[in-house]
Structure formats: C-alpha cells, structure tokens
Amino acid sequence: MPMTIIHPTISAPEQAAHDLQTQGYTVLSPSGVCTLAHCTVAGLEALKPSWNDLPPDQFLLDGGRYRSRRHSCFVVDNGTVKQTPHRGHWQPVEYNALHGGMVRLFEPIAPATIAQPSWTPLLQSIGQICSKVKGLQPWYVEAHQFRIDTAHGIGRPTPEGAHRDGVDFVAILLVAREHVKGGESRIFDANSSNGQRFTLTEPWTLLLLDDVRVIHESTPIQPTAPGGHRDTLVLTYRAGGFQERP
C-alpha cells in the first residue's frame, strides 16, 4: 500500500518571522526561498553536485554506514558572511544523547561550493529572519551537508531521535530526495504534547525552526529503488558564539 504523504503548509517569505514567533516554525517553498535570498532555483541547483562528494560520517555510534557529511562554520553579522577557521562540531549530551560530548571534526565544505553565488545570500537572508525574531546581532552559523543513503537498508536522518540542537534557530533545506520513502519531518512543542508532521518533497523547500520552542526529528528512510538517498543542507544559527566543549 502506498504511503500517504502529508505536505506542509507553505508560508510567504514575509510571514516567516511571524510564524516563528507564533508557532515555532515556518516552511517556505523553493520560490519563496529564492525571493528571500534574491537568487534563482538554477543558482541553488548549482550547489547540488557537491552532495555527490561527501565523505562518510566516521562518528556514527549506532554502527550505521548510511550518512555522509561535510561541515563548516560562518559568522553572519549585519549582512556580511565570514567563514571561520575550520573547527570541530560539539554538542552537549543534553541536546544529543547519542553523539553529545564528542568533538567531531568533519571534512570542510568544499571552497567551490561556498563560492557559488547563491551561498552567501542564502545564509544572509535566513540570518535576517533570525534577527527579526530575536534582534539584530551576529549569528554563529554551522553549515552541514548531509546525505542519508539506503545502500545498506534503512537510513536515519536523525539517529539521536527527537531533539533540540542547543542553538537559536535551525534551517533545514531539502536538496534532493531520490527513490526513497519515509523521511517525514516531525515537530513537537517543547512544553506540550502538540505536534505537526509533514514530508518535504520538493528540492529547496526550507523548514525553519525556533530551536528553543520546538523539538524536531526526521523519520527513517527506506529505498524504493537502487540508489535511494535524501540530501539536506542544515544551517544552525546561534547567538553569542559557537557551542564549545567546557
């Protein structure tokens, strides 16, 4: 029996900050993302080939071989975007029960990817929404390129389960979804049992979350044909600095 896909409610870019303030999340269509970032879908698509060159994640503690990734850090400040020296990714166990407490040093995002014309305005424009909600300030951004594949069976986009990231905002952009089922986005109010679920299916759809107000996860994916995978770009925005090991 075919799996029923629930599509998200799409908001206009000018509604994004209001959505974050009232419900803790917002979803923008690819055209909305392009309006927000003053770019084109073709410009975003120019980023996509780099997902074919992601090294395997060597830190998975569940024994899986389904995730590849790259990671780099930036500071978005009053419209400027500056890349920081390469650094490890760290989260406390309170936010990531599976991989918290580890300094995970991944391969950096390729310079050619960061040099694409759509990269900087994408980070800038999301930072502008964050500042509309929590005030103009520098945003410390960690960028993660993820590929979850199904070559060995089930792939898990969030092996840590429903979680918060310990930041202010989390932006999840679907880059590709090929020959898979599952991968449903689930969002829960951090202080109640209220929740939403839907599946991102169109490349360059943006799910933007207030990480203080909501908990999120993505359900496992399974292949429907050989080569099944799900690619995402995850950008976390944090005020005051990057998360650091004490």
Image (cartoon, rainbow, N blue to C red):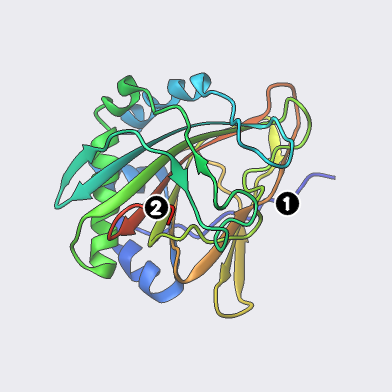
Q: Residue at x 45, y 73 (%)?
A: 23
Element under disc 1? loop
Q: In the rendered view, does 71 fall on the left or right side of 59?
A: left
Q: Which residue is mark 2?
A: 244
Residue 136: image quadrant is bottom left
Q: Is residue 38 above or below residue 57?
A: below
Type of residue at label 2?
Answer: Glu
Residue 191: percent from left, percent from top = 55, 79
Q: Is residue 205 above or below residue 27?
A: above
Element under disc 2? loop
Q: Which residue is mark 1?
A: 4
Residue 93: percent from left, percent from top = 57, 58
Residue 100: percent from left, percent from top = 57, 52
Identify which residue, 56 or 177, lies in the foreground.
56
Type of residue at label 1?
Answer: Thr
Q: Residue at x 26, y 38 (%)?
A: 84
Q: Residue at x 36, y 73 (%)?
A: 21
